[in-house]
């Protein structure tokens, strides 16, 4: 049912500092890191580190009610927040997750890639928050 790994979400207290880490420590070119943008409905700022086989999504809290703020209170240095897999149809995936007994945390909404996403509770996935993302139109497998 799930498709390819799209990205791994990393919550960070500062996207700018995290970008510097990927460049200075891991040798990622700054050309391979996107501009920081805001996704106000989800309470986050984000940028993507483009790698040959997937992306790292750097996410920083935006505003006092950001869900990332709670994560960073427990993990002040940041850490892995979620893993995102692509699915062909987000509504079919949502319904199938419910049938299989998973707790879907939200109705489909637009995510950072401009396509619909849902999140599956970590207790259903060995402690890992899973994001399911509808494959962007025109994307190649």
Image (cartoon, rainbow, N blue to C red):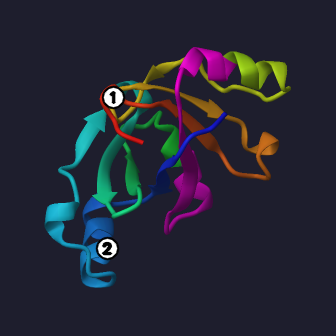
Which secondary structure lies at badge 1? helix
Residue extending furthest front?
Answer: 141
Quadrant for the C terminus, please.
top left
Answer with the quarter of the image where residue 49 lies. Answer: bottom left
Answer with the quarter of the image where residue 79 lies. Answer: bottom right
Which of the two residues, 43 or 26, is positioned nearer the viewer here?
26
Q: Eyeballing the image, is 63 above or below 81?
A: above
Q: Secondary structure at mark 2?
A: helix
* Residue 28 in the image, given as x and y percentages of width and height: 25, 74
Q: Position of residue 81 (x, y in %)?
A: 56, 53
The label number, if any, that marks residue 19 in the structure image: none
Where residue 118 appears, as percent x and y from the top left, is 57, 27
Q: Is residue 104 left or right of residue 26?
A: right
On screen, residue 64 versus residue 105, left or right, reads: left
Tell me the residue that label 2 is attached to: 22
Question: Does the CB distance between marks 2 and 1 fall below 8 Å?
Answer: no
Disc marking residue 40 = 1
Most extreme residue toward the bottom is: 25
Where is 135 relative to 12, above or below?
above
* Magenta-colored span: 70-94
């Amino acid at each position: 049912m799930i498709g390819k790994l799209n990205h791994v979400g990393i919550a960070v207290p500062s996207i700018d500092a995290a970008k510097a880490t990927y460049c200075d420590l891991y040798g990622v070119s700054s050309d391979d890191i996107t501009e920081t943008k805001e996704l106000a409905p989800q309470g986050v700022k984000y940028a993507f580190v483009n790698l040959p086989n997937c992306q790292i999504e750097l996410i920083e809290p935006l505003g006092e009610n950001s869900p990332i703020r709670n994560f960073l209170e427990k993990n002040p240095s940041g850490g892995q927040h979620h893993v995102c897999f692509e699915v062909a149809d987000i509504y079919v995936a949502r319904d199938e997750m419910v049938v299989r007994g998973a707790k879907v945390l939200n109705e489909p909404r637009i995510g950072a890639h401009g396509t619909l996403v849902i999140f599956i509770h970590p207790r259903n996935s060995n402690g890992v928050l899973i994001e399911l993302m509808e494959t962007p139109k025109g994307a190649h497998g």
